[in-house]
Image (spheres, helix red, strand yellow):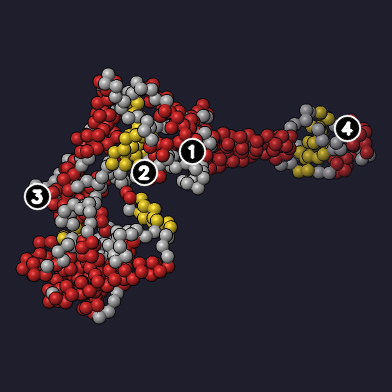
């Protein structure tokens, strides 16, 4: 837009320059002689002072006998003789003067009047032409927006990035599933002779950053076929019918270059459930979806085109899209386990000079819940940190510090705590750490710090000892006690409450309410209360309908309160039982600001740890 405004300003400057040229060409503008009235001219003629008169239209240029010149004007529809006769000019004196009639010169007004109508139209015409030209990529491409903007990744291109299954770690089951697709694209006759039909569409489902797009690229390179990649949002345009046209163009291009792969990322943006009040009623989106459904139905048995699509919201997809014959195969991509994380870290550290002391297995153990994209970002942050420290290699400390940066944000070195705040933060974090270490079902403490990171004044990094898919009531109760341990520690040590526990209380309240309403772990029994909308892969949940009475709501509140109070009592008993140890850890934390796992375990001692449990 700034370029368009710049061009428009240039046009205005050209217009001003043209106007200035016309003004200079105006004879009146160039004429600097004295102008006299026609009566004065008549007087000078009678006195014999005039030698020559040049007539051009109504303009008179008078040359006097002393060589000077003056100008005057006559009446419009009257000759020079008639005009002068009306002013009683002596005819004998007039006959001695040389009178020359010259063609009438064009004045400025003769140009500016037609230009005032034509030039603005020309300027605005050029202006709008430039807008259309820039928005459509050229005057000859007025309807190019109807074509598919899909990006082509051809494995035959030497400059293209080669991604294979070796570059995709932690997704062994998914790679095994899509291996059939690769084999079909390479040798389709093998399957057709057996009467088998390869799935037309494969839906990759998983949380953001788990490797859906990466896996799709790997399939293309392994099969050695063209790979057409397009985001779901790229189908949608302002005009109804553009998305459908792009879908037709995309499928036609893929069929011409078969065998090939079409990859539609974020398909939920166009594949939402159709119908009024469900996912919106945008006609353009629905027409695009209908066209994709029709194109997938049109695939013949021998058409070697595979549709891959990715989403992290499968619950919103239209049932017609998921029925057999369309996207009839769904592959779930989970977040990697510790082994998968170890392999992913090895891939992303290939081009980085790692110190021999780096232990990627330890890093994998410290990063549960990290996706492949998170781990790539982690290794990049570690490399940046090592560069800033002028190191030649990436050390283990750089990677471990980057974990905290990715989880909590960078250190806020300028945010200095007062002595009082420092002690409150130290005892708060010591409470979290000690209760987590002494409760048998709590998570393992990896680091305690009172150095500000992100929005936190301090933090306790506690991670599960092993990968967990199922959580028990005892583990939830231990987690509640750990969450409330900081709040309880402040009460015990200072007999006062600070705002530092606000986030802990919020998490504890949410967890206790879920134990009652969702997991059936309270005295109310195995009942799920309230209908809720859940987006599993992005961790979002919201209650959409209350299906219980006010009496039950009161009981839910009471059970939630009971879980919270029991957890607080557990934390209080644990800290009071080990008060000296609790104070020792907090005082060391005040002095050193951070304590690593090994040092913390030495402080509490294995004997104390066993006794506490």
Which residue is located at x 67 percent, y 39 percent?
23
Q: Residue at x 49, y 43 (%)?
A: 275
Q: Earlier in the sequence, mark 2 or mark 1?
A: 1
Observer-nearest of 417 and 64: 417
Q: Nearer the viewer, mark 4 or mark 2?
A: 2
Considering depth in this image, is 91 or 510 the residue closer to the camera?
510
Residue 255, above or below 457: above
Callout 3 crowding tier (Cα within 10 Å): few <14, some 14–19, many ≥20 = few
Using the image, tell me which numbered label, if any, was put on residue 286.
1
N-terminal of the pair, mark 4 or mark 2, is 4
- Secondary structure of residue under mark 2: helix
Residue 337 relative to residue 21: left or right: left
Q: Which residue is mark 2?
A: 314
Q: What residue would you read off at disc 3?
A: 357
Q: Which label's residue is closer to the chain start, 4 or 3?
A: 4
Q: Is residue 299 left or right of residue 20?
A: left
Alpha carbon separation for disc pair 4 and 2: 94 Å
Quadrant housing residue 292: top left
**Residue 568 image point, x, y percent:** 24, 72
Disc 4 is placed on an element classified as loop
Q: Residue at x 35, y 32 (%)?
A: 201
Cα–Cα span, label 1 and label 4 = 81 Å
Mark 1 falls on what kind of element?
helix
- Residue 144 visible in the current orientation: yes
């Amino acid at each position: 837009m700034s370029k368009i405004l710049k061009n428009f300003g240039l046009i205005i400057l050209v217009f001003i320059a043209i106007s200035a040229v016309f003004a200079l060409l105006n004879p009146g503008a160039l004429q600097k002689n004295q102008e006299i009235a026609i009566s004065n001219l008549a007087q000078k003629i009678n006195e014999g002072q005039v030698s020559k008169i040049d007539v051009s239209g109504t303009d008179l240029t008078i040359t006097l006998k002393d060589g000077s010149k003056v100008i005057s004007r006559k009446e419009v529809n009257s000759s020079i003789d008639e005009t002068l006769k009306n002013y009683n000019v002596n005819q004998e004196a007039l006959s001695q003067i040389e009178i020359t009639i010259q063609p009438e010169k064009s004045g400025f007004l003769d140009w500016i009047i037609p230009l005032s109508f034509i030039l603005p139209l020309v300027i605005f015409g050029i202006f709008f032409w430039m807008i259309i030209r820039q928005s459509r990529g050229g005057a000859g491409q007025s309807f190019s927006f109807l074509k598919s903007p899909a990006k082509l990744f051809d494995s035959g291109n030497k400059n293209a990035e080669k991604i294979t299954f070796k570059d995709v770690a932690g997704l062994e089951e998914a790679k095994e599933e899509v291996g059939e697709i690769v084999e079909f694209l390479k040798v389709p006759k093998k399957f057709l002779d057996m009467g088998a039909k390869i799935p037309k569409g494969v839906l990759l489902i998983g949380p953001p950053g788990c490797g859906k797009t990466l896996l799709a690229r790997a399939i293309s390179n392994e099969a050695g076929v063209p790979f057409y990649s397009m985001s779901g949002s790229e189908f949608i345009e302002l005009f109804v019918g553009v998305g459908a046209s792009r879908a037709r163009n995309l499928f036609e291009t893929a069929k011409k270059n078969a065998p090939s792969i079409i990859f539609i990322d974020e398909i939920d943006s166009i594949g939402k459930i159709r119908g009024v009040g469900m996912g919106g009623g945008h006609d353009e989106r629905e027409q695009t979806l209908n066209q994709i459904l029709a194109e997938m139905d049109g695939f013949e048995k021998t058409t070697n085109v595979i549709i891959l699509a990715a989403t992290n919201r499968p619950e919103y997809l239209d049932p017609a899209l998921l029925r057999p014959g369309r996207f009839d195969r769904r592959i779930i991509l989970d977040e990697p386990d510790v082994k998968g994380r170890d392999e992913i870290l090895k891939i992303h550290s290939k081009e980085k000079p790692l110190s021999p002391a780096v232990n990627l297995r330890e890093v994998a153990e410290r990063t549960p819940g990290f996706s492949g994209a998170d781990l790539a970002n982690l290794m990049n942050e570690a490399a940046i940190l090592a560069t800033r420290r002028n190191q030649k290699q990436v050390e283990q400390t750089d990677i471990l510090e980057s974990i905290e940066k990715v989880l909590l944000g960078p250190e806020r070195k300028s945010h200095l705590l007062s002595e009082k705040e420092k002690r409150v933060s130290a005892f708060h974090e010591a409470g979290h750490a000690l209760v987590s270490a002494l409760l048998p079902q709590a998570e393992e403490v990896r680091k305690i710090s009172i150095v500000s990171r992100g929005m936190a004044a301090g933090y306790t990094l506690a991670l599960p000892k092993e990968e967990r898919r199922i959580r028990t009531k005892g583990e939830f109760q231990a987690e509640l006690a750990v969450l409330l341990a900081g709040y309880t520690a402040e009460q015990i040590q200072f007999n006062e409450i600070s705002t530092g526990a606000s986030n802990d209380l919020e998490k504890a309240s949410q967890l206790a309410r879920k134990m009652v309403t969702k997991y059936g772990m309270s005295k109310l029994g195995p009942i799920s209360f309230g209908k809720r909308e859940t987006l599993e892969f992005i961790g979002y949940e919201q209650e959409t309908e209350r299906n219980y009475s006010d009496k039950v709501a009161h009981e839910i509140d009471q059970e939630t309160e009971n879980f919270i109070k029991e957890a607080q009592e557990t934390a209080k008993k644990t800290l009071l039982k080990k008060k000296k140890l609790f104070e020792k850890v907090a005082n060391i934390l005040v002095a050193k600001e951070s304590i690593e796992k090994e040092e913390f375990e030495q402080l509490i001692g294995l004997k104390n740890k066993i006794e506490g449990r």
